Amino acid sequence: MIQSMTGYGKTVIQLPTKKISIEIKSLNSKNLDLNTRMPSMYREKELDVRKLIASKLVRGKIDFSLYMEITGEETSTQINTTVVKQYIKQLKEVVDGDETEMLKMAVRMPDALTTEREEIDENEWNDIAKVIDSSLEKIQQYRLDEGQTLEADFIDRVQTISNLLDAVIAMDPDRIEGVRERLTKGIADIKEKVDENRFEQELVYYIEKFDITEEKVRLKNHLEYFQKALKSDDSNGKKLGFISQEMGREINTIGSKSNHAPMQKLVVQMKDELEKIKEQLLNVL
């Protein structure tokens, strides 16, 4: 079953002193383009997170965000009392002012506040890792749901092309007969006496240049192969893209060889359906 590269997953967990929110967004991209945002205290886990996301989501423009909101009384930022007192003392030497105002100025000075680097609590990180897994499951389900919608659209459009191909096949004998009649009439109009055997040989050669038997067979095979690939266990948008290119090649050749207005109209409709398929394939994993 195919998957879309578009997806979204979010999970929130409340820990004893903080609330953790995990948010993952995904859009289409030729390769894996992963961007992560995490608080500095969790940076040592970033490589593990990136590997996990890459293994689960494979491809796409992916934004991973880990948000942390402190909800308890804990804080890693402390006032550097000694430094602040020194600043106030120096300020008093410069100007005799209100101590409260001096304190406000002092705490804005360099090194007035210190932040202790928190070590990761492994038990806490294990809880966060479960939340990351949950968000990945949600975005994968989102991708599968989007993939089902895309698959239904592909099947409908491929069937339309197949129906148009059947119409091309049905009108092909009349088209070839029309070519034969035009050539025979053209010779008659110029009132030239020709060698009938030679004329028949040239006629066969000329009609062969307009023959689309191989293109009809190959296009039919490509349509069947495309539908088969849709049902494969893995989602391979690149493979489907290659098949659609081959479909386009055969459709274009039919159009260039047809030399028949009604058939060219059918070819234009096939091209239109194929272009819509190609546009949607850009979003398939």
Image (cartoon, rainbow, N blue to C red):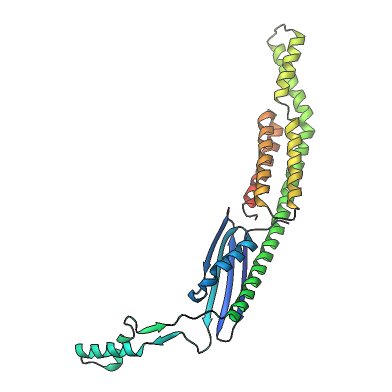
Name the residue at the top extreme. Answer: 193
Q: Position of residue 66 (x, y in %)?
A: 55, 73
Q: Relative to 236, does residue 138 appear above or below in the rendering? A: below
Task: Give the residue at x 28% y 89%.
Answer: 86
**Number of marks in the image?**
0
Residue 9 location, quadrant: bottom right
Q: Position of residue 112 (x, y in %)?
A: 34, 84
Q: Relative to 97, does residue 139 appear above or below in the rendering? A: above
Task: Give the residue at x 66% y 44%.
Answer: 242
Residue 77 location, quadrant: bottom left
Task: Give the residue at x 73% y 38%.
Answer: 219
* Residue 164 in sight here: no
Q: Position of residue 271 (x, y in %)?
A: 66, 41
User: In the image, is 105 to the left or to the right of 57?
Assistant: left
User: In the image, is 41 to the left or to the right of 264?
Assistant: left
Q: Relative to 64, does residue 69 appear above or below in the rendering? A: below
* Residue 51 in sight here: yes
- Looking at the image, which is closer to me, 175 or 245? 245
Residue 261 location, quadrant: top right
What is the quadrant of the C terminus in the image? bottom right
- Looking at the image, which is closer to me, 141 or 84? 84
Q: Position of residue 188 (x, y in %)?
A: 72, 12
What is the quadrant of the N terminus in the image? bottom right
Q: Relative to 2, does residue 85 appear above or below in the rendering? A: below
- Looking at the image, which is closer to me, 262 or 61? 61
